[in-house]
Image (cartoon, helix red, strand yellow):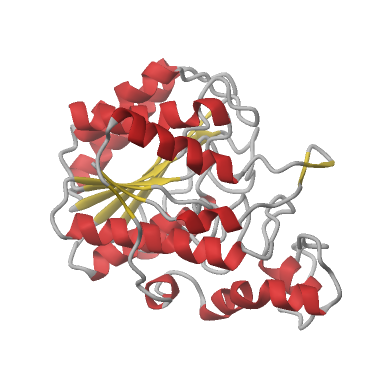
Amino acid sequence: MLTVYSEEHRHQDGRAELINGQLLPCFEMPRRAEMILARVREVGLGEVLPPDDHGRGPIERVHRRDFVDFLARAWDDWTAAGRSHDALPLCWPTRTLRQVCPETIDGRLSYYSLDAGTPITAGTWRAAYASAQVALTGASRVAGGARAVFALCRPPGHHAAADVYGGYCFFNNAAIAAQALRDGGAARVAILDVDYHHGNGTQAIFYDRGDVLVANLHADPRDEYPFFLGYAEETGIGAGEGANLNYPMRHGTGFDLWAEALDNACRKIAAWRADALVVSLGVDTYEGDPISRFRLRSPDFVSYGRRIARLGLPTLFVMEGGYAVEAIGINAVNVLTGFEGE
């Protein structure tokens, strides 16, 4: 299996995130991708290539241009205001406030952000742009006939909506790849999100569309971030009615229950007759993950890689979460070797 990877990810290296009421060192760090790449090479998964540059156009097929412009300029605007530390938002446009984008950088950070856990740094734009190019290059290889490709994206993407960043995500790499596959001729694309946290951004992007099926397996939003999307009754609207599937599960879920949800999602994808599959590959379902509460073990990732392979679809794996850094390479690559071995 081909892996697409960019060293540019290293430029996103935040100092701290707000979590549990404290500013703590970021769980989303460069070493995550480095450990996965090392494991890819250790097991001989296949060739590792850098991404091609597809430009901003495919990104703007998913994200609003004003949002892309904001990310491109945010650090310069932040430092022009006299700051040299990482940029975090001050407040959010809650339900009682108007949804108007301010002119100041503090206001725009607050307007476009989902949380205070996603610092913008001097290298955020470089890393986020390159991560999207990794996904786009993987999509182009799948469109060109590859059975499967691994887009080793960092920063991750599935929490980013058309004009919102957060959850360590800036551009929604899986959504950008799915749209590129549609633009390349695939009539129907399915996105299977197996990250512990709900892919709220992906759901929001495609919620009113019937050409992209989104299936999320995740922690129940009554218990877990991002809290405000991911309920089972969210099934899409308009043309998208029935094309959004949520499988929320409670803290402590183990592989047996999780695999039942996966099998159900795979049956729905097969019945929907997708032409291609994008897997948002988060491995924070692992029992040792420091910010998650499912109980999958490393061999379980091999098993569910095999289950995904049985769909028989051209498949792009797009890396998302996973914060047990010492095990992240084993778990992510276990999915891929399981898929390859089926």
**Which residue is located at x 36 percent, y 70 percent?**
53
> Which image quadrant: the C terminus?
top left
Q: Is residue 43 visible?
A: yes
> Horizontal and vertical percent for residue 148?
22, 45
Drawn side of residue 87 relative to residue 1, left or right: right
Drawn side of residue 137 relative to residue 146, left or right: right
Establish if 79 lies above or below 121.
below
Establish if 48 lies above or below 223.
below
> Which image quadrant: the N terminus?
top left
**Which residue is located at x 38 percent, y 58 percent?**
134
Q: Quadrant of residue 294?
A: top right
> Horizontal and vertical percent for residue 131?
46, 58
Drawn side of residue 228 relative to residue 318, left or right: right
Seen from the viewer's position, the closer of residues 320 and 78 is 78
Q: Quadrant of residue 132?
A: bottom left
Q: Quadrant of residue 236?
A: bottom left
Marks counted in the figure total 0
Q: Residue furthest bottom?
A: 103
**Which residue is located at x 47 percent, y 33 percent?**
283
> Horizontal and vertical percent for residue 184?
21, 68
Establish if 271 lies above or below 249.
below
> Horizontal and vertical percent for residue 273?
17, 48
Q: Is residue 237 visible?
A: no
Seen from the viewer's position, the closer of residues 253 and 244 is 253
Drawn side of residue 186 relative to residue 262, left or right: left
**Which residue is located at x 56 percent, y 60 percent?**
170
Establish if 277 lies above or below 112.
above
